Image (cartoon, rainbow, N blue to C red):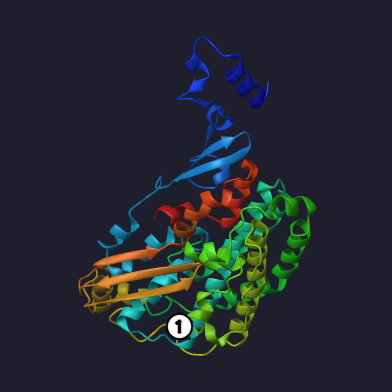
Amino acid sequence: MTIQELIKMINISGGSSEHDHIMHGKEITEKEIKQYNFLNLGPTHPATHGIFQNVLKMDGEIIVDAEPTIGYIHRAFEKLAEHRPFYQIPTITDRLNYCSAPINNIGWHLTVEKLLKIETPKRVDYLRVIIMELARIADHIVCNSVIAVDTGALTGFLYVFQWREKIYEIYEQICGARLTTNIGRIGGFERDFSENVFLNINSFLKEFPKVLSEFEKLVMRNRIFMDRTIDVGKITPERALEYSFSGPNLRAAGVDYDVRVMSPYCSYEDFDFKIPVGTAGDSYDRFCVRQEEMWQSLSIIQQAVQNMPQGSYHADVPEFYLPPKEEVYGSMEGLIWHFKIVMGEIDVPKGQVYHSVEGGNGELGFYLVSDGGRQPYRLHFRRPSFIYYQAYPEMIVGSMLSDAILTMSSMNVIAGELDA
């Protein structure tokens, strides 16, 4: 029996009393009799790719309403940072967007350098650009290959993920770590890039473009993938800006905002690259923007390697730059300075600064307030995932459950960055 037939039966045939079919003089309507189901998408559903929950109000397969719940892995990073010396905070930033941790590390170092008014050598800038663009590629590899998996295409994921491992091997040669890197220092790097590092970077630049092209042939023009992602999870440029979107999600909606261009840092103004922009603001455009960003990142790395400046790999700031390990282990003065810097016993100027970088998911900002003490008086992380996830309910209402999964994947919500 259909809902309309049921309503007609109640309103016409009557019941045990007049109130069975009359509500305060009004006939029962379809809206009043309709039953909805409630579905928990998360917090541990594998399709969420993280620990967060969405309570979906369902009319069959159609999402009528959605309410997100966050905070399942909230670790109070900002409050933790306010009780740590400046040199002990990079390990906290590692755990924000762990798919591109070096960008978090370098963003924090740049913020402290802005407070301390440290000018880094050109070589440091170029080395940082190489690392950040490698991290951007690694981040986008994860996002785009996972979107394909959520449409049922596993082959591309398995094929490109080995190249993420090759990027991690480059990290490992530079700093000894792979996922949570704690890479770099305030003022530069612990050591210069070795010859093997540059050999592996050049090898990656030579071999990865072929892999990226093959991945695009597998997925980008695949009819099933296109049908599943085009016009799914759309957002207009106006709404994206009202929600304060940034990064690939904003550019996919048609707004060409990129921190590397609008507020250059690390000598990004020296590099020639394009900002890919979408038109529809849907899941397919978000995929395509990230694909093109990988090509642009390869170009930027190539330019940095070819035009690498000579000079030091760190700024001349001995009061903030950790001394070499041989001095720490071999002389009392080196050991004392290492202790003083790590434990925050060097005077830091009072003031407040904001610095942002173009993270894998958008504008990653650090608002730092110093009262001259050994740790920040206040520190706020502008986490792009936390900001654009607020739009998720609006983007999925009216769509099917399967579309909601793809929309979440295409937004690249990272739980560590979301909750912080």
Q: Looking at numbered disc 1 in the image, what kind of residue is underneath it? A: Tyr
Please tell me how crowded label 1 is: few (under 14), some (14-19), or many (20+) other residues with Cα within 10 Å.
many
Name the residue beneath numbered marker 1: 313
Task: Please state if 30 lies on the left or on the right of 416 as rendered.
Answer: right
Of the 4 image quadrants, the one containing the N terminus is top right
Q: Residue most toward the bottom? A: 310
* Image vertical order of residue 382 relative to residue 50, above or below: below
* Image vertical order of residue 214 relative to residue 275, above or below: above
Residue under the image location 67 percent in, 74 percent down: 205
Residue under the image location 35 percent in, 84 percent down: 118
Q: Position of residue 221 (x, y in %)?
A: 78, 59
Task: Please state if 336 lies on the left or on the right of 170 as rendered.
Answer: left
Q: Position of residue 368 (x, y in %)?
A: 31, 71
Residue under the image location 50 percent in, 55 percent down: 391
Q: Is residue 331 visible?
A: yes
- Which sits in the foreground, 345 or 15? 15
- Which sits in the foreground, 403 or 234? 234
Q: Residue most toward the front? A: 25
Q: Position of residue 59 (x, y in %)?
A: 59, 35
| SS at badge 1 | loop
Q: Quadrant of residue 167?
A: bottom right
Of the 4 image quadrants, the one containing the C terminus is bottom left
Task: Please state if 169 lies on the left or on the right of 348 as rendered.
Answer: right
Q: Is residue 361 visible?
A: no
Q: Quadrant of residue 398?
A: top right
